[in-house]
Structure formats: C-alpha cells, structure tokens
Image (cartoon, grey):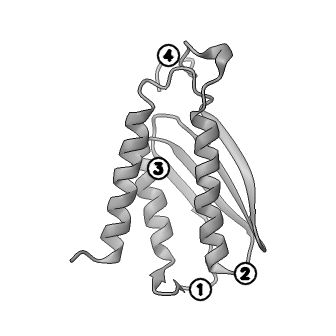
Amino acid sequence: QVDDHHTVEDIGIALGQAFQLALGDKRGIRRYASLCLPMDEALILCAVDVSGRGGYYGELDFPTEKIGTFDTQLVHEFMEAFAVNAKLTLHLRRLSGRNSHHIAEGAFKALGRALREAASVEEAFRDEIPSTKGML
C-alpha cells in the first residue's frame, strides 16, 4: 500500500523517463511547442522545451483542494516529476477557470498535445539536433 502522493510522483517519474528515452538523441525534433487549450470554462497555457534540462514552472491555482478524493496538489507533484525526469522545461498556467476538474483535465491534455508537437520530427531538419551546442 502506497499513499497517493508517492503513487502520483512515481508515475510522473516513470513516464518522464520513458519519454526521455523514447526521444533518443532528439535528432530532427521540433523541440519547442506551446498552445492554449480550452476545457469548458478553463483555459490552460502550456509551453514545453525539450531542452535536456528538467524543470516545471506552473501556476494552475486550483480553486479547491480536492477533485473528488484526489488532492489537487498532486497535479503539481506529477508535473514536476515528469518534467525533471523527461528532462524538459514545462510551463503551465491557468488563464481562466473555476472548476478544478476542468483545470486539471485541461493541463494534462495541453501537456499531451504540446509534447506531441515538440517531439514530432521536422522533415527539413531530420538529421539535425535542434541546438547550437549539437546536443540536448
């Protein structure tokens, strides 16, 4: 039996490590992506940089402490564990929203869409690593 905090954090770590390994040397990826995702009344800004340096910078500011029995602080714990272990810079902002469920759902969906774009390969740069240093 493991508490919710450590379960959520461990899932973030495992998924972050899997994402980082799946990208290999990151040759040809777009690297950067951002979007604003509407989820009913909530509007979430997500920006990612597959930089090789992990960091989470979020301001989701949930209006409630719980979504059912789920502690909203655990969204932060997941995002931080994921970003650090995926070795990417992640920014999330709640631009509007009153419903904690919609804010959390919007944050996860925005992250997924931003990651899909940032990890996609740009055909014109297929053989290049998107960094002036030649590595990420």
Q: Is residue 100 above or below residue 126?
A: below
Q: Residue at x 34, y 76 (%)?
A: 4
Left or right placement of residue 119 versus residue 102 in this view: left
Q: Secondary structure at mark 1?
A: loop
Q: Amino acid at mark 4?
A: Gly
State the residue position of label 1.
Answer: 64
Q: Quadrant of the N terminus?
A: bottom left
Which of discs 2 and 4 lies nearer the camera? The answer is 2
Q: Secondary structure at mark 2?
A: loop
State the residue position of label 3.
Answer: 83
Q: Amino acid at mark 3?
A: Ala
State the residue position of label 4.
Answer: 134
The CA span between labels 2 and 4 is: 44 Å
The CA span between labels 1 and 2 is: 9 Å
Which of the two labelled residues, at mark 1 and mark 4, occupies the earlier sequence position? 1
Which of the two labelled residues, at mark 1 and mark 3, occupies the earlier sequence position? 1
